[in-house]
Amino acid sequence: MIPYSLVRPVLRCFDPETAHQYAIRALKAGWGPRQTYADDPILATKVWGLDFPNPIGLGAGFDKHAEVPDAALAMGFGFVETGTVTPKPQPGRDRPRLFRLDEDDAVINRFGFNSEGLTVFAGRLAERRKRGARGIVGANIGKNKDTVEAEGDYVACIEALSAVADYIVVNVSSPNTPGLRALQAREQIAALLRTVISARERATSKGSRAPVLIMKVAPDLSPEELCDLGEVAVESGIDGLIVANTTVARPASLRSSHKNEDGGLSGKPLFGPSTECLKQFYRITKGRLPLIGCGGVASGADAYAKVRAGASLVQLYSALVFHGPELIGRIKRDLAARLRADGFKSVADAVGADHR
């Protein structure tokens, strides 16, 4: 594998979105790195009846159109989340819409759910199922910008993806689609969750395994909104939560000239607030709902902190921009060492340890 330290200067010759497109093309061409060793057994974990070789996943946004999930799995991820996909194709917002904040190890995006549409997306996932591809792959779903009644878009996605995705994430927390985050209010989210859970039951009524259904939430919620959302999630019967999405906040510590760009901020500055949000959701749900910790993960220490805060699984994405795919192996090795150093026999044993 070519060290990322050599590749990164080349990618920096292009604007961030073009560099990302070249990365996807490279993976499609088979030029991506591959993990050649088995994961440490201490990292294996079972959540929702699914066997994860390790708890480190690739977050949504990297493989928006389900083009390279297997190439991403081959890099060493324990699971991969594709999307966000919308029912109808849409271009998203105008470029530029992706910004590297190099001084802050952060990224701002305002893509606005650019999507090739559900037909193409579902077809790609169906093809990998047909050829017997292994590995856990999820699908992150959203609504089209011009859709007024959001429920219909989420139902359409669930109906199309139930047979081809291992889990489905209901994205109600992107800051880049007008009105989307309003769906997180108690009454709106309760109604939406009833609708999507019913859609899953209908889609799987013929005997196929029901996919795991997860909701992705924002880190910018008030304590009252957090409590409402956590209580509704437990009552609804949804399978889990991803905590958290990007933030619209702009910490005073940001130094990059891009810090005031519109959009969602991810990367290192998100670690603190997203982890605190994770802790609060774990307390509110009393550990009854599996959580995926997302936001600012760039080391084994970060991943371990998410686990101890209550995450059964952990996702990353932005850190790859700054540290490359070699980061995946480093995180896993460090996480395994930290689990053993604290006397844990597995990832599951450490989940929520900070609350005990």
Image (tube, helix red, strand yellow):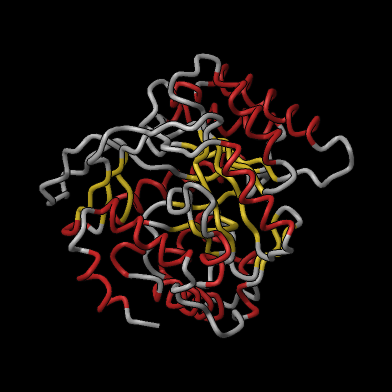
Is 355 drawn above or below residue 280 in the view shown?
below
User: Viewed as shown, does residue 344 lie left or right of 131?
Assistant: left
Q: Residue furthest right?
A: 207
The residue shown at (48%, 58%) is 306
Is 194 drawn above or below residue 245 in the view shown?
above
Q: Residue furthest top?
A: 148
The one of 125 and 340 positioned closer to us in this rendering: 125
Q: Residue furthest bottom?
A: 37
Q: Position of residue 336 (x, y in %)?
A: 53, 77
User: Viewed as shown, does residue 145 lie left or right of 195?
Assistant: left
Is 99 drawn above or below residue 133 in the view shown?
above
The residue shown at (74%, 57%) is 130
User: Viewed as shown, does residue 229 lie left or right of 9?
Assistant: right
Q: Position of residue 46 (x, y in %)?
A: 71, 62
Q: Position of residue 87 (x, y in %)?
A: 56, 30
The one of 72 and 28 positioned closer to us in this rendering: 28
Q: Quadrant of residue 41?
A: bottom right
User: Viewed as shown, does residue 348 lie left or right of 299?
Assistant: right
